[in-house]
Image (cartoon, helix red, strand yellow):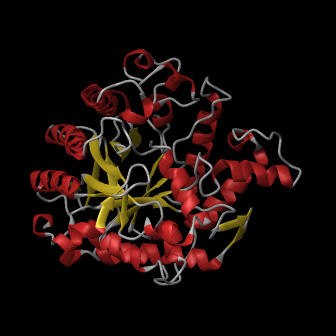
Amino acid sequence: MILRSSPTYRKKMVVAGNGLFYPIVGFASCVAFIYMSFGGLGTNLQEKTKLGFVERNGTQFMLDGKAFYINGWNSYWLMDHSVDEYTKPRVREILQAGATMGLTVCRTWAFNDGDYNALQISPGRFNEQVFKALDHVIVEARQQGIRLLFSLVNNLQAYGGKTQYVKWAWDEGVGLSASNDSFFFDPSIRNYFKNYVKTLLTRKNTLNGIEYRDDPTIFAWELINEPRCITDASGDTLQDWIEEMSAFVKAIDKKHLLTVGLEGFYGPKNPKRLTVNPEMWASRLGSDFIRNSKVPNIDFASVHIYPDHWFHDKEFHENLKFVSKWMHSHIEDGDKELNKPVMFTEYGLSNQNKDFEPSQRDRFYKVILDAIYKSAKKNGSGAGSLVWQLFVGGMDKLARLHGPTQQQRNLKDLCSQRQ
């Protein structure tokens, strides 16, 4: 139980929403709250290797015939750090720490396209050493009783993302446009992505002999991290892509759940764009929470929570009010519009805010976990949350000792979006 965690352990576990490192004593207390409140939420460590597939029944996740609520975290770097032997122990350390705290799901990248330690070197060409690193992540997670939410591609440039796919098509002379958004509509790029997805889902793990699509350690697939298609604010281009890719995934893998990876913004035709979106720009990004999440092959909705990133002129107490309203709106959507679980797959608070105090994170996290708990007590659609994000001690020291490698630059790029 996390309340008995040693001081040494607390020093090793740190959380960063912006690339800086902060002891997670406050976060641990919030996890303790939700863990004790739900009782059976945490994984029984004595039965940690006995995993079944997580399923969906209406607005709830189900596991072994019972409602399953998720309290977890993001550590996007697991595959990347499993490649090299000197960084590999961090994967076990973070998964053990999560299990010790009663966390149940870790969201991480199952992609690295054309970058340092690339999984996909070029379209259809894969680095077997990196694939074996991903094999290791899955086996290690299973041993710790942690399930994985695998994201399949990045809307951002870090770790390749849609930018790399467009560059590949352009370099091969088959690209229709140099725009990053051509990732969503260029037939050649769609085929690149489909080939990648098929290769990943049908991969036979070299350590346990199980194909990824048959492994219950994987909680779900996420199509893309934070999709935006700004060149088509109507949302039609992204909607077509979601419909096509979700059907493709389900044709290969019917056992796992699937989500989009949305930030949760309401589109130009949704009246909530005026009352719930952070600002008007949020309705012009080519995504729409309701429309995208209603796609039949999408099993649950995903939402992110970054008020200090979305607003630049609000005080902390105003951001807390926004978080409550934001979560209530999306849980209401899950209950009344979607009849699907709603999972808050990223949330964080930057310590570079001008008025930041460490105690603010406790209050911020508590608002989020309270909202999920309130929904769960009513058997509502609020299905869980994943904090952004957890590292292990020493990851920040590498850059200071050796200078910024491509790996650290990727980390900085990813985390800076939260500032």
The residue closer to the viewer here, 35 or 189, is 35
Q: Position of residue 193 (x, y in %)?
A: 67, 54
Q: Is residue 307 visible?
A: yes
The residue closer to the viewer here, 17 or 156, is 17
The structure residue drawn at horizontal position 58% and vertical position 40%, both measured from the top left corner, is 243
The structure residue drawn at horizontal position 62% and vertical position 64%, both measured from the top left corner, is 406
Q: Quadrant of the C terminus?
A: top left
Note whether 261 is above or below 132 in the view shown.
above
Relative horizontal placement of residue 271, taking residue 125 as reference (left or right):
left
State how many labels appear: 0
Relative horizontal placement of residue 163, taking residue 377 as reference (left or right):
right
Residue at the farthest right position: 173
The structure residue drawn at horizontal position 29% and vertical position 73%, both measured from the top left corner, is 96
Q: Position of residue 323 (x, y in %)?
A: 29, 32
The residue closer to the viewer here, 237 or 313, is 313
Relative horizontal placement of residue 290, taking residue 333 as reference (left or right):
right
Note whether 81 is above or below 105 in the view shown.
below
Q: Position of residue 74 (x, y in %)?
A: 39, 56
Q: Quadrant of the N terminus?
A: bottom left
Q: Is residue 250 visible?
A: no
Note whether 101 is above or below 280 in the view shown.
below
Q: Position of residue 5 (x, y in %)?
A: 15, 69
